[in-house]
Image (cartoon, rainbow, N blue to C red):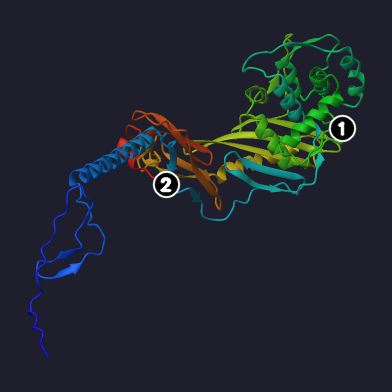
């Protein structure tokens, strides 16, 4: 048998066939230079275009950068044009002061009702319960208050001239028979508003009380309705009026309710001027007539109104001013239902009460003049000190806690030394001034604020 010749151990090198440009034909085999393998039919990837890819990446980066810049500019602009917070004032001292000890014991009357109130501090005390009792002529405080609300009277001015009706004059004999306190009006008599109110409050003229009701509302019933509506507004829940003079025993109230009324009335300048007169002096040159408030000018008493009927007993409401360590206080009190033959019993009891109340008042200085007692907060972390124009002194009595508060509407910018608020400590109010210039928040604070 013929033997076949042996093959060479090495693989025959197959040279890579060149691709014919544009022919679309590829070789049927490819070589690594040493081994040849069959062609799998997959064309090789075309060569990359590096310059074009770089150009695309550059454009994308530029777009991102511009978008980021636009976003940053928008955020910055938005932060800067946003309104800054409204500045506020906050306390830098304690928000209250407690006076140590027990509440004072006042010399309360053994009969009737009484109450003592200090403006800005509250009720010092009361006695005798809260059952409504006849007011007598103390009702004329409400008559004057209602009339002055509808017909304001400027300080020191006489006001319009009023004409007395024949009806009021015709009632004089009946009123005299009942022993009412009267001015003694005559038909078509002329009275200025001030003189009418002086007659009402100083000599307690019932005839003028009923005439004021007609002048104001046209008839007594309509005016009495206004009196009761006003009592409701003032929170006088145990009060009911049936007439403008208080002669009718159906007109009832309590000592605490009368304190509420006198507090409101003492805020009316014309009222405070009138009740601070000892006597009524008529315009026609007639003799002066003394009022019943013999406490005027004593113990700081600056006003009041007496009342008496058999049903009511002696009644008296009063106001007194007392300066304690430079702080002016206003004491309002009422004494009702005293078993005495006139209002004098109530006036005397009030004198003892007001003296004791004034003696119970004491004072503590919380901060000296110029002290930093508050600050303006700009809402973005900045504060400006506020300093007291005068000593911050709180007045009170043993056992009382007095709140301390600060008020004001500070601007965004102001010069140092400008007054921008006040601190209130009970009855005392002390202005506050800027300890340095007040500036708006900086651009950096506006930019980095959150929320």
Relative to 193, residue 332 above or below: below
Specify the quadrant of the image occupied by residue 25.
Answer: bottom left
349 left or right of 390 in image: right
Instruction: Give the position of the N terminus as an image quadrant.
Output: bottom left
Query: Which of 42 and 183 lies nearest the eye of the viewer?
Result: 42
Instruction: Give the position of the C terminus as an image quadrant.
Output: top left
Separation of marks 1 and 2 at Cα, in angstroms: 53 Å
- Dot 1 corresponds to which residue? 248
57 left or right of 215 in image: left
Q: Secondary structure at mark 2?
A: loop
| Residue 424 locus on image (x, y percent) | 49, 39
- The residue under the point 83% across, 17% down is 184
Judge depth for marks 1 and 2 and give the one in front. Answer: 2
Query: Which of 67 and 168 lies nearest the eye of the viewer?
Result: 67
Count of marks placed on residues: 2
Query: Which of 301 and 80 lies nearest the eye of the viewer?
Result: 80
381 left or right of 319 in image: left
Relative to 142, residue 237 above or below: below
Please tell me how crowded label 1 is: few (under 14), some (14-19), or many (20+) other residues with Cα within 10 Å: some
Q: Is residue 180 visible?
A: no
Question: From this viewpoint, which residue is outermost toward the bottom?
Answer: 1
Relative to 182, residue 379 above or below: below
Question: From this viewpoint, which residue is outermost toward the front?
Answer: 1
| Residue 105 locus on image (x, y percent) | 62, 51
| Residue 165 locus on image (x, y percent) | 86, 13
- The residue under the point 72% across, 27% down is 145
Q: Are marks 1 and 2 in contact (CB under 8 Å)?
A: no
Query: Which of 72 and 29 lies nearest the eye of the viewer?
Result: 29
Q: Earlier in the sequence, mark 1 or mark 2?
A: 2
- Dot 2 corresponds to which residue? 93
Q: Is residue 177 visible?
A: yes
Q: Secondary structure at mark 1?
A: loop
């Amino acid at each position: 048998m013929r033997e076949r010749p042996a093959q060479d151990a090495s693989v025959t090198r197959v040279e890579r066939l060149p691709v014919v440009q544009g022919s679309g034909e590829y070789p049927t085999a490819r070589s690594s230079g040493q081994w040849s393998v069959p062609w799998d039919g997959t064309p090789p990837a075309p060569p990359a275009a590096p310059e074009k890819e770089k150009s695309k990446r550059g454009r994308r980066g530029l777009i991102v950068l511009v978008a980021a810049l636009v976003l940053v500019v928008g955020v910055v602009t938005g932060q800067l044009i946003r309104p800054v917070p409204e500045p506020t004032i906050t306390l830098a001292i304690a928000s209250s002061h407690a006076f140590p000890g027990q509440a004072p014991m006042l010399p309360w009357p053994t009969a009737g009702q009484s109450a003592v109130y200090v403006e800005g501090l509250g009720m010092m005390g009361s006695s005798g319960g809260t059952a409504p009792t006849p007011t007598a002529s103390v009702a004329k405080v409400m008559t004057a208050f209602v009339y002055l609300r509808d017909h304001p009277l400027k300080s020191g001015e006489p006001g319009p001239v009023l004409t007395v009706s024949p009806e009021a004059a015709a009632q004089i004999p009946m009123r005299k028979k009942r022993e009412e306190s009267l001015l003694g009006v005559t038909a078509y008599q002329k009275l200025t508003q001030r003189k009418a109110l002086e007659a009402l409050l100083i000599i307690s003229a019932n005839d003028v009380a009923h005439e004021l009701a007609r002048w104001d509302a046209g008839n007594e019933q309509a005016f009495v309705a206004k009196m009761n509506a006003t009592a409701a507004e003032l929170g006088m829940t145990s009060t009911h009026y049936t007439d403008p003079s208080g002669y009718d025993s159906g007109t009832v109230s309590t000592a605490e309710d009368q304190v509420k009324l006198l507090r409101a009335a003492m805020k009316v300048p014309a009222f405070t001027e009138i009740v601070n007169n000892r006597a009524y002096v008529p315009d026609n040159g007639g003799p002066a007539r003394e009022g019943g408030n013999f406490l005027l000018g004593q113990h700081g008493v600056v006003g009041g109104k007496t009342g008496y009927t058999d049903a009511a007993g002696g009644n008296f409401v009063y106001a007194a001013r007392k300066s304690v360590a430079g702080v002016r206080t206003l004491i309002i009190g009422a004494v009702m239902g005293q078993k005495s033959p006139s209002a004098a019993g109530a006036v005397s009891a009030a004198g003892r009460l007001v003296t004791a109340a004034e003696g119970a008042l004491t004072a503590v200085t919380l901060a000296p003049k110029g002290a930093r007692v508050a600050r303006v907060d700009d809402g973005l972390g900045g504060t400006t000190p506020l300093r007291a124009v005068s000593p911050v002194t709180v007045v009170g009595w043993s056992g009382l806690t007095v709140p301390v508060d600060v008020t004001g509407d500070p601007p965004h910018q102001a010069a140092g030394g400008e007054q921008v608020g006040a601190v209130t400590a009970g009855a005392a109010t002390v202005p506050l001034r800027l300890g340095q210039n007040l500036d708006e928040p900086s651009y950096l604070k506006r930019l980095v604020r959150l929320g």
